Image: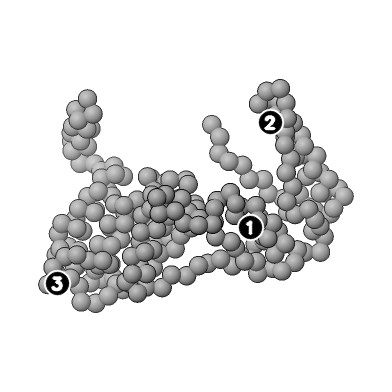
Amino acid sequence: LLDQTQLEYQSCKDERQSLDFDDLEGLTARLLTEHPSVRAQIQSDLRAVLVDEFQDTNDRQRQIVYALTGFNDQSPIENRKSEIVNLFIVGDAKQSIYKFRSADVTVFRQVQRDIRAAGGLSLDLDLTFRAHRPLLETLNSLLAPILGETDDPARPYAVPFAPLKAYRQEPREKVQQPFVEFHLGLGDSAEEGRAAAAQALAKRLRELHDTEGFDYGEMALLFRSST
């Protein structure tokens, strides 16, 4: 049934001379990996390739990036480009939990290893300008035991905890402890629990505004997505 569905779907695309997003990835990878002359022509126009949010890549996208730059090129010597195309990637492995378009964090980590093995430079961007030091120390102490601090080769998808450093050493003047609070909404049902949590949150935000001098415009609410 799956094979028949794919044949019908491909036939419909062929009639319309159309490509879907999966085709754009797959055919690009095939074009660059199976046709050395095309790959060489494209590489000749490039000096560097920068890929941001690299944790959102899958292995096919990695193939495209490697083909564009000639990085880890396994083709015969005579087919390789003589000039180097620099590869620069930026990403946060922990954000791979969102798994955009089948993103695979093991791909990101493998590319990191490939770059280091090739003599490339790996930089940890661990200095944050957002949080002050006392808040960050609290968050680091909370997250370290939850995420784990050692790498497990048997679980390459599990990214160990990496502490951040704070540029701001102290909070601004009116910010007082506690810097992290935990409020739990309880009820006889999930709906009652959510209502209790919402009421407690609204009350706390009003206290911050009325008694601690925070403007409502200084507050941000972050929620996980829900359906």
Q: Which of marks 2 and 1 is nearer the N terminus?
A: 1
Measured as percent of width and height from the top left, residue 214 is found at 80, 53
Residue situated in front as seen by the camera: 25 or 94? 94
Measured as percent of width and height from the top left, residue 109 is found at 39, 58
Colour pattern of the rendering: one colour
For residue 69, side relative to residue 36 (left or right): right
Measured as percent of width and height from the top left, residue 122 is found at 43, 70
Mark identifier at residue 60: none
Q: Name the residue under label 2.
A: 194
Q: Which of marks 1 and 3 is in front?
A: 1
Say which amino acid is labelled 3. Answer: Ile
Residue at 19% x, 30% y is: 3
Q: Which residue lies furthest to the top in this view?
A: 188
Residue situated in front as seen by the camera: 200 or 145? 145
Mark identifier at residue 77: 3
SS at mark 3? helix
Say which amino acid is labelled 1. Answer: Asn
Q: How many C-alpha atoms fall within 10 Å of the one at disc 3: few (<14), some, or many (≥20)?
A: few
Q: Residue furthest bottom?
A: 83
Query: Disc 2 and disc 1: Cα gap in Å?
Result: 28 Å
Mark identifier at residue 140: 1
Residue at 20% x, 35% y is: 10
Say which amino acid is labelled 2. Answer: Arg
Residue at 16% x, 65% y is: 75
